[in-house]
């Protein structure tokens, strides 16, 4: 009876973490749907609007860096509740501050900063909280956890599009308040859910110096950078491939490309989440990385745009396991890594998410806006990913 009660308790914690990734999907993907509306309603130039993406990313990176110093001091429960509060506060302030500030852009920018704090904290917190739960197969739980970001991404885009079609985009503030309910409710759930410790009772975690001195740690950092870069180098350009491949409008392209990528990525994570106890993680990650290389080559050399779009979808499936799998490999290989390890892994992943699209865009612009050339240049990331997986097999558990 006691074990059943305990299972119910930690299952509530895991379910709250699943919902936490939906919150992060809302934070990252709702406001970009409003960019054109901001441009038209507030007369904000596009150059300023794109700054919102940069600010969101930079603030999340800063939180990744700082979190290792304060999460252990104030506790995981307090931190994750604060993360949900910031996410909700940012979305709510988005409906108020543009009218309060003399410059609407300043109000939007402050709102983005607020919810970016929540998004950054969630990225650092959710994986170790699930890792600490007494689950039978942690790799399965981790893969399933990260699939919820994909489903959340799809849900935000689909439901927001339906809402705007029915009620009009002029009612976007109502939708922002509706989305804000998710972090409010999930924050309350976390308040009542048990949070388990990453370390056994009496066990001392690694110091920052000890963590940084381990060779296997840097291999895991390489895996996280490459997993983020391999994913985003293609994901960012998914809508372009959809427009070209299907001959549809930009609006439909924005839906079809990213939705196909997110669906296939979520499917990969759901597959491993269900059958992971029967599949060797190293083999699945290696096979997925090889498939990722094939998809990059398909995108770059396919003679027809529709084949490039298909390669884009295949890429979504292939990269699905790379991010959660790297988290799981690090947790298994580095005992006592604690919050600092997960914070650095999140930082490395976010850096990869920036460097992949940056390299692809840089090469594309220098090759006469040849997007295929940019994607081909970014193939270096799955190549390094494969090398990192090989290296991780050679390094003994530390």
Image (cartoon, rainbow, N blue to C red):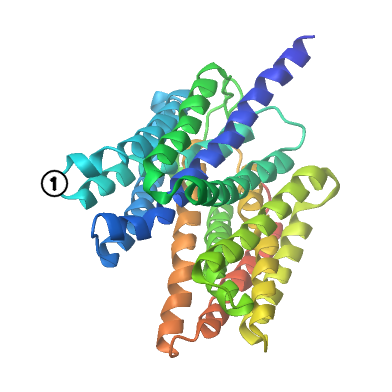
Q: Position of residue 98 (x, y in %)?
A: 24, 44
- Residue 318: tell me if it is visible: yes
Question: What percent of the width, then of the height, locates residue 175?
Answer: 44, 40
Q: Residue at x 63, y 35 (%)?
A: 131
Query: Which image quadrant for residue 119?
Result: top left
Q: What residue occupies the far right of the structure in this picture?
A: 278
In the displayed structure image, the side of residue 212 where residue 3 appears, left or right: right
Q: Is residue 341 visible?
A: no
Asked whether, in this view, residue 166 is left or right of residue 145, the answer is left
Please, is residue 198 above or below residue 43 in the view? above
How many residues crowd around disc 1 within 10 Å: few (fewer than 14), some, or many (20 or more)? few
Horizontal side, residue 319 vs residue 343: left or right: right
Q: Quadrant of the N terminus?
A: top right
Q: Is residue 354 above or below residue 145?
A: below
How many labels, in total? 1
Expressed as whole percent of the image width and height from the top left, the position of residue 185 reads 50, 25
Q: Nearer the viewer, residue 304 or 131?
A: 304
Residue beneath label 1, please? 102
Q: Secondary structure at mark 1?
A: loop
Q: Nearer the viewer, residue 235 or 203?
A: 235
- Residue under the point 41% across and 35% down: 177
Name which residue lies at 62% across and 78% down: 245
Q: Is residue 317 above or below residue 86?
A: below
* Farthest top residue in view: 1
Q: Report the residue at 18% width, 39% height from top.
A: 100
Measured as percent of width and height from the top left, residue 250 is found at: 50, 70
């Amino acid at each position: 009876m006691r074990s059943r009660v305990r299972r119910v308790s930690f299952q509530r914690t895991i379910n709250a973490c699943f919902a936490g990734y939906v919150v992060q999907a809302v934070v990252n993907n709702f406001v970009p749907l409003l960019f054109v509306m901001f441009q038209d309603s507030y007369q904000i130039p596009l150059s300023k609007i794109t700054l919102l993406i940069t600010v969101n990313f930079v603030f999340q990176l800063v939180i990744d860096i700082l979190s290792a110093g304060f999460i252990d001091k104030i506790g995981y429960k307090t931190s994750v509740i604060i993360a949900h509060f910031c996410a909700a506060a940012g979305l709510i302030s988005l409906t108020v501050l543009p009218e309060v500030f003399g410059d609407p852009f300043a109000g939007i920018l402050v709102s983005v900063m607020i919810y970016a704090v929540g998004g950054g904290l969630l990225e650092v917190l959710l994986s170790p909280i699930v890792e600490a739960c007494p689950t039978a197969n942690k790799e399965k739980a981790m893969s399933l956890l990260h699939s919820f970001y994909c489903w959340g991404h799809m849900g935000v885009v689909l439901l927001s599009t339906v809402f705007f079609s029915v009620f009009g985009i002029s009612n976007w503030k109502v939708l922002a308040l509706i989305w804000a309910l998710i972090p409010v409710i999930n924050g309350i759930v976390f308040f009542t859910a048990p949070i388990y410790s990453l370390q056994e009772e009496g066990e001392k975690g690694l110091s920052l110096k000890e963590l940084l001195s381990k060779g296997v740690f840097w291999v895991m950092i390489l895996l996280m950078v490459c997993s983020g870069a391999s994913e985003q180098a293609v994901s960012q350009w998914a809508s372009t491939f959809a427009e070209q491949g299907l001959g549809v409008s930009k609006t439909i392209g924005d839906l079809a490309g990213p939705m196909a990528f997110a669906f296939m990525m979520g499917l990969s994570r759901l597959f491993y989440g269900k059958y992971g106890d029967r599949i060797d993680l190293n083999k699945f990650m290696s096979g997925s990385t090889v498939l990722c290389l094939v998809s990059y080559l398909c995108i770059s050399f396919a003679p027809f745009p529709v084949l490039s779009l298909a390669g884009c979808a295949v890429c979504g499936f292939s990269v699905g396991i790379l991010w959660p799998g790297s988290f799981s490999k690090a947790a298994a290989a580095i005992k006592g890594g604690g919050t600092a390890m997960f914070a650095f892994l999140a930082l490395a992943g976010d850096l990869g998410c920036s460097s992949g699209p940056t390299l692809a865009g840089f090469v594309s612009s220098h090759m006469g806006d040849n997007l295929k050339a940019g994607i081909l240049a970014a193939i270096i990331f799955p190549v390094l990913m494969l090398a990192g997986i090989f290296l991780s097999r050679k390094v003994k558990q530390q």
